[in-house]
Image (tube, grey):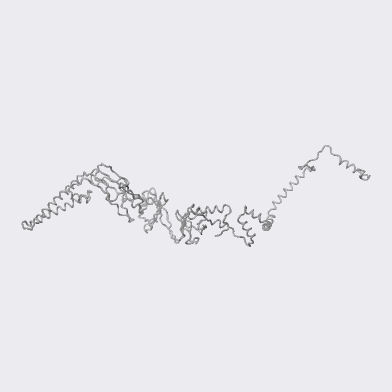
Amino acid sequence: MTRAEMGGRSPPAGQGRQEEQQAAPEPSVAPRQSASGSADVRRRPGRGLIVAGLVLSAVAAAALARPWWQPPLQAWLEAKQPAAGEGQEGEHEHAGEHAHEGEHNHAHQARSEGETAPRTPASHDQATTIELSPQAQRNVGLSLITVEPRDFQRTVSVPATIVQRPGRSQITVSAPLTGIVTRIYPIPGQAVRPGEPLFELRLTHEDLVEKQTAFLRDLEQLDVAKQELARLEDVTRSGALPGKMLLEQGYERQKLEGAMRAEREALLLHGLSDEQIQTIEKQRRLIRKLVIATPEPDSDHASGAHQDFLQVARLAINRGDHVNTGTPLAILSDHCELYIEGSAFEQDAQVLNRVANAGTEVSALVESEATGKREVSGLRILYVEDQVERDSRALKFYAGLANELVRNEATPDGRRFISWRYKPGQRVEVLVPVERWERRVVLPVQAVVQEGAESFVFLKHGDHFDRQAVHVEYRDQQWAVLGADGALAPGQQAVANGAYQIHLAVKNKTGGGADPHAGHNH
Protein backbone atom coordinates (compact mmCIF):
# COMPACT_ATOMS: atom_id res chain seq x y z
CA MET A 1 0.00 0.00 0.00
CA THR A 2 1.45 3.37 -0.97
CA ARG A 3 1.47 6.49 1.02
CA ALA A 4 -1.16 7.92 -1.32
CA GLU A 5 -3.51 5.05 -0.62
CA MET A 6 -3.01 5.40 3.12
CA GLY A 7 -4.30 8.93 2.94
CA GLY A 8 -1.05 10.57 3.37
CA ARG A 9 -0.50 8.95 6.77
CA SER A 10 2.99 7.96 7.56
CA PRO A 11 3.51 4.33 8.78
CA PRO A 12 4.71 3.57 12.22
CA ALA A 13 8.31 3.43 12.91
CA GLY A 14 9.97 0.33 11.56
CA GLN A 15 6.91 -0.87 9.59
CA GLY A 16 8.10 0.39 6.29
CA ARG A 17 11.38 -1.28 6.73
CA GLN A 18 9.69 -4.70 7.46
CA GLU A 19 7.53 -4.51 4.36
CA GLU A 20 10.49 -3.77 2.25
CA GLN A 21 12.30 -6.76 3.71
CA GLN A 22 9.31 -9.08 3.07
CA ALA A 23 8.86 -7.88 -0.46
CA ALA A 24 12.48 -8.31 -1.29
CA PRO A 25 13.08 -11.89 -2.56
CA GLU A 26 15.87 -14.05 -1.27
CA PRO A 27 18.43 -14.15 -3.89
CA SER A 28 19.93 -17.66 -3.35
CA VAL A 29 17.32 -20.04 -1.67
CA ALA A 30 14.60 -21.63 -3.89
CA PRO A 31 11.23 -22.62 -2.39
CA ARG A 32 10.77 -26.45 -1.55
CA GLN A 33 8.16 -28.13 -3.72
CA SER A 34 5.79 -30.75 -2.25
CA ALA A 35 4.68 -33.89 -4.06
CA SER A 36 1.66 -31.98 -5.49
CA GLY A 37 3.76 -29.22 -6.94
CA SER A 38 3.03 -26.53 -4.24
CA ALA A 39 5.58 -25.01 -2.01
CA ASP A 40 6.16 -26.84 1.27
CA VAL A 41 7.08 -25.22 4.53
CA ARG A 42 10.48 -26.25 5.83
CA ARG A 43 10.11 -28.72 8.72
CA ARG A 44 12.05 -29.07 11.83
CA PRO A 45 14.72 -31.84 11.78
CA GLY A 46 13.45 -34.15 14.76
CA ARG A 47 9.63 -33.93 14.45
CA GLY A 48 9.17 -37.24 12.42
CA LEU A 49 11.15 -39.30 14.89
CA ILE A 50 9.10 -38.00 17.78
CA VAL A 51 5.79 -38.91 16.06
CA ALA A 52 6.97 -42.45 15.23
CA GLY A 53 8.05 -43.01 18.82
CA LEU A 54 4.64 -41.92 20.14
CA VAL A 55 2.81 -44.31 17.75
CA LEU A 56 4.96 -47.27 18.76
CA SER A 57 4.43 -46.50 22.44
CA ALA A 58 0.67 -46.39 21.95
CA VAL A 59 0.64 -49.75 20.13
CA ALA A 60 2.75 -51.38 22.86
CA ALA A 61 0.48 -50.01 25.58
CA ALA A 62 -2.62 -51.30 23.77
CA ALA A 63 -1.07 -54.75 23.42
CA LEU A 64 -0.21 -54.86 27.13
CA ALA A 65 -3.74 -53.80 28.07
CA ARG A 66 -5.45 -56.29 25.71
CA PRO A 67 -6.74 -58.62 28.48
CA TRP A 68 -8.65 -55.66 29.97
CA TRP A 69 -10.22 -54.05 26.88
CA GLN A 70 -10.80 -57.02 24.53
CA PRO A 71 -13.61 -58.92 26.44
CA PRO A 72 -15.87 -55.85 26.84
CA LEU A 73 -15.30 -54.91 23.20
CA GLN A 74 -16.11 -58.43 21.97
CA ALA A 75 -19.27 -58.59 24.10
CA TRP A 76 -20.39 -55.22 22.73
CA LEU A 77 -19.81 -56.36 19.13
CA GLU A 78 -21.76 -59.61 19.69
CA ALA A 79 -24.62 -57.64 21.21
CA LYS A 80 -24.72 -55.35 18.19
CA GLN A 81 -24.47 -58.16 15.59
CA PRO A 82 -28.22 -59.14 15.41
CA ALA A 83 -29.20 -55.53 14.85
CA ALA A 84 -26.67 -55.16 12.12
CA GLY A 85 -27.90 -58.42 10.62
CA GLU A 86 -31.47 -57.10 10.48
CA GLY A 87 -30.34 -53.97 8.73
CA GLN A 88 -28.01 -55.69 6.29
CA GLU A 89 -29.72 -59.04 5.68
CA GLY A 90 -28.53 -59.38 2.10
CA GLU A 91 -24.88 -58.87 2.97
CA HIS A 92 -24.97 -61.45 5.78
CA GLU A 93 -26.67 -64.04 3.57
CA HIS A 94 -24.08 -63.50 0.88
CA ALA A 95 -21.25 -63.85 3.39
CA GLY A 96 -22.91 -66.94 4.92
CA GLU A 97 -22.79 -68.76 1.58
CA HIS A 98 -19.00 -68.64 1.76
CA ALA A 99 -18.29 -68.84 5.52
CA HIS A 100 -21.11 -70.62 7.41
CA GLU A 101 -23.49 -71.82 4.71
CA GLY A 102 -25.83 -74.03 6.74
CA GLU A 103 -26.29 -72.15 10.03
CA HIS A 104 -26.43 -68.52 8.73
CA ASN A 105 -28.81 -69.28 5.86
CA HIS A 106 -31.32 -71.04 8.13
CA ALA A 107 -30.99 -68.39 10.85
CA HIS A 108 -31.64 -65.44 8.53
CA GLN A 109 -34.39 -67.34 6.71
CA ALA A 110 -36.13 -67.92 10.04
CA ARG A 111 -35.89 -64.21 10.91
CA SER A 112 -37.18 -63.12 7.52
CA GLU A 113 -40.20 -65.43 7.80
CA GLY A 114 -40.94 -64.37 11.35
CA GLU A 115 -40.05 -67.63 13.09
CA THR A 116 -39.39 -67.39 16.81
CA ALA A 117 -36.88 -70.32 16.99
CA PRO A 118 -34.11 -71.23 14.51
CA ARG A 119 -34.70 -74.30 12.30
CA THR A 120 -32.66 -77.49 12.72
CA PRO A 121 -29.79 -77.58 10.21
CA ALA A 122 -29.94 -80.21 7.49
CA SER A 123 -26.34 -81.35 8.15
CA HIS A 124 -27.53 -84.31 10.26
CA ASP A 125 -29.63 -85.70 7.41
CA GLN A 126 -26.88 -85.12 4.92
CA ALA A 127 -24.41 -87.13 7.02
CA THR A 128 -26.68 -90.13 7.55
CA THR A 129 -29.02 -90.40 4.56
CA ILE A 130 -28.60 -90.75 0.82
CA GLU A 131 -30.86 -91.47 -2.12
CA LEU A 132 -29.49 -93.73 -4.86
CA SER A 133 -30.78 -94.01 -8.38
CA PRO A 134 -31.45 -97.47 -9.84
CA GLN A 135 -28.30 -97.11 -11.94
CA ALA A 136 -26.20 -96.29 -8.87
CA GLN A 137 -27.63 -99.30 -7.03
CA ARG A 138 -26.59 -101.55 -9.89
CA ASN A 139 -23.16 -99.92 -10.05
CA VAL A 140 -22.38 -100.76 -6.42
CA GLY A 141 -23.83 -104.27 -6.75
CA LEU A 142 -26.48 -103.54 -4.13
CA SER A 143 -28.11 -106.49 -2.39
CA LEU A 144 -30.37 -106.52 0.67
CA ILE A 145 -30.81 -108.85 3.61
CA THR A 146 -33.71 -109.05 6.04
CA VAL A 147 -32.79 -108.48 9.68
CA GLU A 148 -33.77 -111.62 11.58
CA PRO A 149 -32.29 -112.66 14.96
CA ARG A 150 -30.78 -116.13 14.99
CA ASP A 151 -28.24 -118.23 16.82
CA PHE A 152 -24.59 -117.95 15.83
CA GLN A 153 -21.70 -120.29 16.50
CA ARG A 154 -18.28 -118.69 16.93
CA THR A 155 -15.59 -120.76 15.33
CA VAL A 156 -11.83 -120.92 15.06
CA SER A 157 -10.24 -121.42 11.66
CA VAL A 158 -7.80 -124.30 11.27
CA PRO A 159 -5.80 -124.79 8.04
CA ALA A 160 -6.36 -128.13 6.34
CA THR A 161 -5.87 -130.02 3.08
CA ILE A 162 -8.05 -132.47 1.15
CA VAL A 163 -6.36 -135.88 1.02
CA GLN A 164 -7.21 -139.38 -0.18
CA ARG A 165 -8.55 -141.96 2.20
CA PRO A 166 -5.69 -144.27 3.08
CA GLY A 167 -6.35 -147.79 1.80
CA ARG A 168 -9.65 -146.75 0.23
CA SER A 169 -9.14 -144.15 -2.48
CA GLN A 170 -6.66 -146.14 -4.58
CA ILE A 171 -7.10 -149.66 -5.97
CA THR A 172 -4.18 -151.57 -7.50
CA VAL A 173 -5.07 -154.05 -10.23
CA SER A 174 -2.53 -156.90 -10.34
CA ALA A 175 -2.05 -159.82 -12.72
CA PRO A 176 -3.76 -162.92 -11.28
CA LEU A 177 -1.75 -165.32 -13.48
CA THR A 178 1.40 -165.38 -15.52
CA GLY A 179 0.86 -164.35 -19.08
CA ILE A 180 1.43 -161.87 -21.86
CA VAL A 181 -0.58 -158.66 -22.15
CA THR A 182 -2.42 -158.82 -25.45
CA ARG A 183 -4.90 -155.95 -25.02
CA ILE A 184 -5.42 -152.85 -22.87
CA TYR A 185 -9.00 -151.57 -22.87
CA PRO A 186 -9.01 -148.19 -20.98
CA ILE A 187 -6.82 -145.14 -21.35
CA PRO A 188 -5.48 -142.94 -18.52
CA GLY A 189 -8.17 -140.71 -17.03
CA GLN A 190 -11.04 -142.82 -18.30
CA ALA A 191 -13.87 -143.73 -15.95
CA VAL A 192 -14.79 -147.40 -15.69
CA ARG A 193 -17.61 -149.22 -13.96
CA PRO A 194 -17.27 -152.44 -11.97
CA GLY A 195 -17.13 -155.46 -14.27
CA GLU A 196 -15.89 -153.59 -17.35
CA PRO A 197 -12.79 -155.14 -18.99
CA LEU A 198 -9.39 -153.65 -18.28
CA PHE A 199 -6.75 -156.06 -19.69
CA GLU A 200 -6.50 -159.26 -21.68
CA LEU A 201 -3.77 -161.83 -20.96
CA ARG A 202 -2.69 -164.82 -22.97
CA LEU A 203 -2.13 -167.40 -20.26
CA THR A 204 1.17 -169.14 -19.97
CA HIS A 205 0.84 -170.30 -16.38
CA GLU A 206 1.44 -174.07 -16.07
CA ASP A 207 -0.56 -174.42 -12.89
CA LEU A 208 -3.63 -172.91 -14.52
CA VAL A 209 -3.25 -175.22 -17.50
CA GLU A 210 -3.05 -178.22 -15.19
CA LYS A 211 -6.09 -177.07 -13.20
CA GLN A 212 -8.13 -176.64 -16.35
CA THR A 213 -6.96 -180.04 -17.66
CA ALA A 214 -7.90 -181.77 -14.41
CA PHE A 215 -11.25 -180.05 -14.43
CA LEU A 216 -11.96 -181.21 -17.98
CA ARG A 217 -10.86 -184.78 -17.18
CA ASP A 218 -13.06 -185.01 -14.10
CA LEU A 219 -15.89 -183.49 -16.08
CA GLU A 220 -15.61 -186.28 -18.68
CA GLN A 221 -15.35 -188.97 -15.98
CA LEU A 222 -18.42 -187.56 -14.30
CA ASP A 223 -20.35 -187.89 -17.53
CA VAL A 224 -19.26 -191.54 -17.80
CA ALA A 225 -20.17 -192.19 -14.18
CA LYS A 226 -23.65 -190.75 -14.71
CA GLN A 227 -24.24 -192.95 -17.76
CA GLU A 228 -23.02 -196.08 -15.91
CA LEU A 229 -25.21 -195.27 -12.95
CA ALA A 230 -28.26 -194.96 -15.22
CA ARG A 231 -27.49 -198.35 -16.83
CA LEU A 232 -27.05 -200.09 -13.48
CA GLU A 233 -30.35 -198.72 -12.26
CA ASP A 234 -32.17 -200.43 -15.16
CA VAL A 235 -30.31 -203.73 -14.66
CA THR A 236 -30.84 -203.72 -10.91
CA ARG A 237 -34.59 -203.23 -11.30
CA SER A 238 -34.69 -206.34 -13.50
CA GLY A 239 -32.88 -208.37 -10.79
CA ALA A 240 -29.87 -209.25 -12.95
CA LEU A 241 -27.39 -207.44 -10.67
CA PRO A 242 -27.30 -206.93 -6.95
CA GLY A 243 -28.01 -203.44 -5.54
CA LYS A 244 -24.48 -203.29 -4.07
CA MET A 245 -22.98 -202.42 -7.45
CA LEU A 246 -25.49 -199.60 -7.91
CA LEU A 247 -24.55 -198.20 -4.54
CA GLU A 248 -20.81 -198.31 -5.32
CA GLN A 249 -21.38 -196.47 -8.61
CA GLY A 250 -23.26 -193.77 -6.74
CA TYR A 251 -20.30 -193.27 -4.42
CA GLU A 252 -17.99 -192.90 -7.41
CA ARG A 253 -20.19 -190.17 -8.82
CA GLN A 254 -20.09 -188.25 -5.54
CA LYS A 255 -16.30 -188.39 -5.50
CA LEU A 256 -16.07 -186.93 -8.99
CA GLU A 257 -18.51 -184.15 -8.17
CA GLY A 258 -16.51 -183.27 -5.02
CA ALA A 259 -13.26 -183.14 -7.00
CA MET A 260 -14.87 -180.87 -9.59
CA ARG A 261 -16.09 -178.47 -6.90
CA ALA A 262 -12.55 -178.20 -5.58
CA GLU A 263 -11.15 -177.64 -9.05
CA ARG A 264 -13.79 -175.01 -9.74
CA GLU A 265 -12.75 -173.09 -6.64
CA ALA A 266 -9.11 -173.37 -7.67
CA LEU A 267 -9.92 -171.88 -11.04
CA LEU A 268 -11.76 -169.03 -9.38
CA LEU A 269 -8.73 -168.37 -7.19
CA HIS A 270 -6.55 -168.27 -10.28
CA GLY A 271 -8.65 -165.43 -11.67
CA LEU A 272 -11.23 -167.18 -13.83
CA SER A 273 -14.81 -166.02 -13.51
CA ASP A 274 -17.95 -168.16 -13.17
CA GLU A 275 -18.81 -167.38 -16.78
CA GLN A 276 -15.43 -168.62 -17.96
CA ILE A 277 -15.76 -171.85 -15.96
CA GLN A 278 -19.22 -172.39 -17.41
CA THR A 279 -17.70 -171.87 -20.86
CA ILE A 280 -15.21 -174.67 -20.13
CA GLU A 281 -18.09 -176.94 -19.13
CA LYS A 282 -20.15 -176.17 -22.23
CA GLN A 283 -17.42 -176.02 -24.87
CA ARG A 284 -15.08 -178.57 -23.22
CA ARG A 285 -12.14 -176.37 -24.17
CA LEU A 286 -9.37 -174.78 -22.14
CA ILE A 287 -9.33 -171.03 -21.59
CA ARG A 288 -6.35 -169.58 -23.46
CA LYS A 289 -6.98 -165.90 -22.71
CA LEU A 290 -7.88 -164.21 -19.46
CA VAL A 291 -9.83 -160.93 -19.31
CA ILE A 292 -9.16 -158.89 -16.15
CA ALA A 293 -12.25 -156.85 -15.19
CA THR A 294 -12.74 -153.73 -13.06
CA PRO A 295 -13.11 -154.64 -9.37
CA GLU A 296 -15.88 -153.50 -7.10
CA PRO A 297 -15.23 -150.17 -5.31
CA ASP A 298 -15.14 -149.86 -1.57
CA SER A 299 -18.61 -149.88 -0.07
CA ASP A 300 -17.61 -148.47 3.33
CA HIS A 301 -18.54 -144.80 2.96
CA ALA A 302 -19.48 -142.47 5.78
CA SER A 303 -21.71 -140.39 3.50
CA GLY A 304 -23.93 -143.33 2.58
CA ALA A 305 -23.99 -142.31 -1.09
CA HIS A 306 -21.62 -143.58 -3.73
CA GLN A 307 -21.08 -143.20 -7.45
CA ASP A 308 -19.97 -146.47 -9.04
CA PHE A 309 -17.17 -144.90 -11.02
CA LEU A 310 -13.48 -145.63 -10.83
CA GLN A 311 -10.90 -143.56 -12.67
CA VAL A 312 -7.79 -144.98 -14.30
CA ALA A 313 -5.12 -143.00 -12.50
CA ARG A 314 -2.11 -144.82 -13.97
CA LEU A 315 -1.29 -147.66 -16.36
CA ALA A 316 1.82 -149.59 -15.29
CA ILE A 317 2.29 -151.93 -18.29
CA ASN A 318 2.31 -151.87 -22.07
CA ARG A 319 0.87 -154.18 -24.64
CA GLY A 320 3.08 -157.22 -25.16
CA ASP A 321 4.64 -157.16 -21.68
CA HIS A 322 5.12 -160.47 -19.94
CA VAL A 323 3.77 -160.30 -16.42
CA ASN A 324 3.99 -162.67 -13.52
CA THR A 325 1.42 -163.38 -10.90
CA GLY A 326 1.02 -160.27 -8.72
CA THR A 327 2.52 -157.76 -11.16
CA PRO A 328 0.75 -154.34 -10.84
CA LEU A 329 -1.10 -153.53 -14.05
CA ALA A 330 -2.95 -150.30 -13.21
CA ILE A 331 -4.00 -148.00 -10.35
CA LEU A 332 -7.65 -146.98 -10.12
CA SER A 333 -8.81 -144.05 -8.00
CA ASP A 334 -12.06 -143.81 -6.07
CA HIS A 335 -12.69 -140.18 -5.12
CA CYS A 336 -16.32 -140.56 -4.22
CA GLU A 337 -15.33 -139.70 -0.66
CA LEU A 338 -12.20 -137.99 0.61
CA TYR A 339 -10.72 -136.84 3.89
CA ILE A 340 -10.02 -133.34 5.20
CA GLU A 341 -6.71 -133.40 7.04
CA GLY A 342 -6.50 -130.53 9.52
CA SER A 343 -3.32 -129.24 11.13
CA ALA A 344 -4.18 -127.73 14.52
CA PHE A 345 -1.98 -126.55 17.36
CA GLU A 346 -1.31 -128.93 20.19
CA GLN A 347 -3.22 -126.64 22.61
CA ASP A 348 -6.35 -127.19 20.48
CA ALA A 349 -6.46 -130.90 21.33
CA GLN A 350 -9.06 -130.42 24.08
CA VAL A 351 -11.42 -128.47 21.82
CA LEU A 352 -11.07 -131.00 18.99
CA ASN A 353 -11.69 -133.98 21.24
CA ARG A 354 -14.73 -132.30 22.79
CA VAL A 355 -16.22 -131.58 19.36
CA ALA A 356 -15.45 -135.12 18.15
CA ASN A 357 -16.94 -136.77 21.26
CA ALA A 358 -20.10 -134.65 21.14
CA GLY A 359 -20.58 -135.25 17.40
CA THR A 360 -20.79 -131.50 16.78
CA GLU A 361 -20.88 -130.57 13.13
CA VAL A 362 -18.04 -128.52 11.68
CA SER A 363 -17.81 -126.55 8.44
CA ALA A 364 -15.09 -126.17 5.85
CA LEU A 365 -14.23 -123.41 3.40
CA VAL A 366 -12.81 -124.92 0.21
CA GLU A 367 -10.85 -122.67 -2.12
CA SER A 368 -12.32 -122.32 -5.60
CA GLU A 369 -11.10 -120.14 -8.46
CA ALA A 370 -14.58 -119.40 -9.79
CA THR A 371 -16.50 -118.59 -6.59
CA GLY A 372 -13.73 -117.68 -4.16
CA LYS A 373 -14.49 -119.99 -1.24
CA ARG A 374 -17.21 -122.60 -1.03
CA GLU A 375 -18.62 -123.50 2.38
CA VAL A 376 -19.31 -127.15 3.11
CA SER A 377 -21.34 -127.77 6.26
CA GLY A 378 -22.49 -130.84 8.13
CA LEU A 379 -19.02 -132.40 8.51
CA ARG A 380 -17.95 -134.44 11.49
CA ILE A 381 -14.50 -135.09 12.90
CA LEU A 382 -13.69 -138.78 12.55
CA TYR A 383 -10.63 -138.95 14.78
CA VAL A 384 -7.78 -136.93 16.23
CA GLU A 385 -4.27 -138.33 16.10
CA ASP A 386 -2.69 -139.24 19.42
CA GLN A 387 0.68 -137.70 18.66
CA VAL A 388 2.06 -134.30 17.67
CA GLU A 389 4.43 -134.06 14.75
CA ARG A 390 7.97 -133.47 15.92
CA ASP A 391 9.04 -130.94 13.27
CA SER A 392 5.90 -128.89 12.61
CA ARG A 393 4.35 -129.32 16.09
CA ALA A 394 1.01 -129.86 14.34
CA LEU A 395 -1.80 -132.04 15.63
CA LYS A 396 -3.56 -133.85 12.79
CA PHE A 397 -7.29 -134.55 12.71
CA TYR A 398 -9.53 -135.91 9.96
CA ALA A 399 -13.09 -135.33 8.78
CA GLY A 400 -15.00 -137.14 6.01
CA LEU A 401 -15.90 -135.20 2.85
CA ALA A 402 -18.51 -136.52 0.42
CA ASN A 403 -17.56 -135.63 -3.15
CA GLU A 404 -19.76 -134.50 -6.03
CA LEU A 405 -19.60 -135.21 -9.74
CA VAL A 406 -19.35 -132.05 -11.85
CA ARG A 407 -18.77 -133.83 -15.17
CA ASN A 408 -20.03 -137.16 -16.51
CA GLU A 409 -19.61 -137.25 -20.27
CA ALA A 410 -19.34 -140.09 -22.79
CA THR A 411 -17.40 -139.61 -26.02
CA PRO A 412 -18.55 -140.96 -29.40
CA ASP A 413 -16.13 -143.89 -29.16
CA GLY A 414 -17.79 -145.05 -25.95
CA ARG A 415 -15.25 -143.80 -23.42
CA ARG A 416 -16.51 -141.99 -20.34
CA PHE A 417 -14.78 -139.16 -18.51
CA ILE A 418 -15.74 -137.72 -15.14
CA SER A 419 -14.58 -134.90 -12.91
CA TRP A 420 -15.03 -134.42 -9.16
CA ARG A 421 -15.69 -131.14 -7.39
CA TYR A 422 -13.15 -131.73 -4.64
CA LYS A 423 -9.67 -132.99 -5.41
CA PRO A 424 -6.79 -134.14 -3.24
CA GLY A 425 -4.37 -131.32 -2.56
CA GLN A 426 -6.93 -128.51 -2.33
CA ARG A 427 -6.47 -126.16 0.61
CA VAL A 428 -9.29 -125.90 3.14
CA GLU A 429 -10.13 -123.93 6.27
CA VAL A 430 -11.96 -125.97 8.90
CA LEU A 431 -14.27 -123.93 11.15
CA VAL A 432 -14.32 -125.56 14.60
CA PRO A 433 -17.12 -124.22 16.89
CA VAL A 434 -15.98 -122.90 20.27
CA GLU A 435 -18.73 -120.49 21.44
CA ARG A 436 -22.40 -119.90 20.76
CA TRP A 437 -24.53 -116.72 20.79
CA GLU A 438 -28.31 -116.89 20.89
CA ARG A 439 -30.80 -114.48 19.31
CA ARG A 440 -28.34 -112.15 17.64
CA VAL A 441 -28.52 -110.17 14.41
CA VAL A 442 -25.96 -111.77 12.11
CA LEU A 443 -25.04 -109.95 8.90
CA PRO A 444 -22.41 -110.56 6.24
CA VAL A 445 -19.16 -108.90 7.24
CA GLN A 446 -19.25 -106.61 4.18
CA ALA A 447 -22.60 -105.20 5.37
CA VAL A 448 -20.95 -103.49 8.38
CA VAL A 449 -18.79 -100.43 7.67
CA GLN A 450 -16.18 -99.60 10.27
CA GLU A 451 -14.69 -96.12 10.56
CA GLY A 452 -12.47 -95.58 13.57
CA ALA A 453 -14.37 -96.61 16.69
CA GLU A 454 -17.76 -96.47 14.94
CA SER A 455 -19.53 -99.23 13.02
CA PHE A 456 -22.48 -98.60 10.71
CA VAL A 457 -25.06 -100.44 8.64
CA PHE A 458 -27.36 -98.90 6.04
CA LEU A 459 -31.10 -99.50 6.26
CA LYS A 460 -33.46 -99.09 3.33
CA HIS A 461 -36.41 -96.75 3.87
CA GLY A 462 -38.30 -96.27 0.65
CA ASP A 463 -35.97 -94.70 -1.90
CA HIS A 464 -33.43 -93.66 0.74
CA PHE A 465 -30.73 -95.44 2.70
CA ASP A 466 -30.19 -94.35 6.31
CA ARG A 467 -26.98 -94.97 8.22
CA GLN A 468 -27.43 -96.68 11.58
CA ALA A 469 -24.71 -97.03 14.22
CA VAL A 470 -24.40 -100.56 15.64
CA HIS A 471 -22.31 -102.44 18.19
CA VAL A 472 -20.30 -105.36 16.81
CA GLU A 473 -19.73 -108.14 19.32
CA TYR A 474 -17.78 -110.43 17.02
CA ARG A 475 -16.45 -110.33 13.49
CA ASP A 476 -14.72 -112.94 11.36
CA GLN A 477 -13.98 -113.32 7.67
CA GLN A 478 -17.63 -113.99 6.81
CA TRP A 479 -20.03 -112.75 9.46
CA ALA A 480 -20.52 -109.88 11.88
CA VAL A 481 -22.54 -110.45 15.09
CA LEU A 482 -24.34 -107.35 16.35
CA GLY A 483 -25.17 -106.71 19.98
CA ALA A 484 -28.74 -107.15 21.19
CA ASP A 485 -29.22 -103.42 21.94
CA GLY A 486 -32.27 -102.77 19.75
CA ALA A 487 -30.40 -100.76 17.13
CA LEU A 488 -31.94 -102.93 14.41
CA ALA A 489 -35.50 -104.21 14.40
CA PRO A 490 -36.58 -107.56 12.91
CA GLY A 491 -37.92 -107.23 9.39
CA GLN A 492 -35.83 -104.24 8.38
CA GLN A 493 -33.96 -104.34 5.08
CA ALA A 494 -30.20 -103.88 5.51
CA VAL A 495 -27.64 -103.47 2.75
CA ALA A 496 -25.69 -106.73 2.48
CA ASN A 497 -23.42 -105.84 -0.41
CA GLY A 498 -22.35 -102.32 -1.42
CA ALA A 499 -22.47 -100.74 2.05
CA TYR A 500 -18.94 -99.36 1.86
CA GLN A 501 -19.60 -97.68 -1.50
CA ILE A 502 -22.74 -96.09 -0.06
CA HIS A 503 -20.69 -94.88 2.92
CA LEU A 504 -18.21 -93.20 0.57
CA ALA A 505 -21.05 -91.58 -1.36
CA VAL A 506 -22.48 -90.11 1.88
CA LYS A 507 -19.09 -88.71 2.86
CA ASN A 508 -18.54 -87.19 -0.57
CA LYS A 509 -21.97 -85.60 -0.50
CA THR A 510 -21.58 -83.99 2.93
CA GLY A 511 -18.04 -82.85 2.21
CA GLY A 512 -18.91 -81.17 -1.13
CA GLY A 513 -21.19 -78.28 -2.12
CA ALA A 514 -24.73 -77.57 -1.00
CA ASP A 515 -27.01 -80.58 -0.97
CA PRO A 516 -30.05 -80.22 -3.28
CA HIS A 517 -32.08 -82.18 -0.71
CA ALA A 518 -31.01 -79.99 2.21
CA GLY A 519 -33.87 -79.62 4.69
CA HIS A 520 -35.59 -82.81 3.51
CA ASN A 521 -36.20 -84.84 6.65
CA HIS A 522 -36.89 -88.58 6.67
The image position of residue 6, as x and y in percent, is 92, 45
Q: Total label count?
A: 0
Nearer to the camera, 428 or 288 = 288
Nearer to me, 202 or 165: 202
Which image quadrant: the N terminus? Answer: top right
Q: Is 34 on the left-hand or right-hand side of 136? A: right
Q: Residue furthest bottom?
A: 116
Q: Quadrant of the C terminus?
A: bottom right
Residue farthest to the left, as pictured: 240
Can residue 181 be seen in this snapshot? no
Coordinates of residue 417 in the picture (x, y in percent): 33, 48
The answer to whether 324 appears left or right of 405 in the picture is left
Q: Residue at x 60, y 60 (%)?
A: 119
> What residue is rendered at 80% in x and 40% in y?
31
* Residue lying at the far top of the rendered structure: 28
Q: Position of residue 10 (x, y in %)?
A: 93, 44
Estimate the x, y position of residue 51 in percent, counting from the top left.
75, 46
Relative height, residue 452 to residue 43 (above, below): below
Q: Going by the image, does 19 lie left or right of 88?
A: right
Quadrant of the image occupied by residue 325: top left
Observer able to see residue 505? yes
